[in-house]
Image: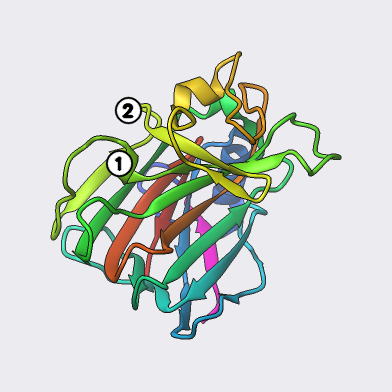
Amino acid sequence: MAIQSTIEYEGPGEGVGNGNGKALGHIKQAMADGVYTMDITGIDATNHGSVDAVTPPTTLADGSMMNTEVRAGHIASVAGPAGGEGGSLMLETDSSNGRLRVNDAFSSAQQFKLGDLHDLSFDYNIESSDRADVIPVIRVAIDADGNLATTSDRGELVFEYAYQNLGSTQTGSWQHADLAGDDWNAWQRSNGANHDVYPDIQHLSNWSDADGYTPAGGIHFDANSVVLGWSIALGSGNGTDVMYLDNLHVGGVTYDFAI
């Protein structure tokens, strides 16, 4: 089953819009405002091999482009653990060689400035993990100078639980990670390298304020840098894991992963 998506119509007494009449008008207005919920279904990518398997991009209902990358693992839309609402995204790695990604690239109309990234959060549930400091990772794609005609200044902000000083993770129950509200630490991936040692691990507010931050050997991000999209990631040396994710908020958009 291919990846599918629907933008919800949240009018009184209404469910998901059917693309007709009043619902369509409300959905278009929500998209123009940049505040809406999108149901994502049909994700199912398995690859137990040692080389990344990358799917071609699928155009979602809001015009963004989504694809998956899988090595030694499995990503799927599933019912998920008890307490989830209508399903979730399962991320399962076979070993420390596992590498999982769900990527979403914004259309030009959806891009916004890093200084306006006031909502970045998600729910997660750890069924099992070899480590007590790992949850799904959010990676935010950034164009440093905001000029989309130049591409050599692009990178990612990477938000990992292990750098937050939050203690050991909890298994078997749904948890909430508020990356923007709690001003999580992030490191930069740029110029083909991970800039992931102190002092280059900085709070989101330092990356996104007017002065911004430039890591050693990296590129400068600040409030005027442009957010190009996001990724959900798990793996790359983190052992064998089974985790679930739902209700990802990026800016004004909620991504509801369903069966």
Q: Dot 1: within a 10 Å radius of its alpha carbon, few (fewer than 14), some, or many (20 or more) residues? A: some
Distance, label 2 to label 1, CA atoms, is: 8 Å
Res. 233 image quadrant: bottom left
> Mark 2 near mark 1, Cβ–Cβ under 8 Å?
yes
Q: Residue at x 47, y 72 (%)?
A: 43
Q: Secondary structure at mark 1?
A: strand
- In the rendered structure, the answer to whether residue 257 lies left or right of residue 24 reads left
Q: Which residue is mark 1?
A: 177
Q: Is residue 110 above or below residue 71?
A: above
The range drawn in magenta is 1-9
Q: Residue furthest top?
A: 210
Q: Which residue is mark 2?
A: 182
Q: Residue at x 46, y 82 (%)?
A: 46
- In the rendered structure, the answer to whether residue 183 lies left or right of residue 127 reads right
Q: Position of residue 66 (x, y in %)?
A: 60, 62
Task: Residue type at mark 1: give it.
Answer: Ala
- In the rendered structure, the answer to whether residue 45 lies left or right of residue 228 reads left
Q: In terms of sequence position, does the residue under pointer 2 or pointer 1 come before the other?
A: 1
Res. 228 image quadrant: top right
Q: Nearer the viewer, residue 64 or 46?
A: 46
Say whether residue 205 is magenta: no
Q: Residue at x 30, y 41 (%)?
A: 177
Which image quadrant: the C terminus? bottom left
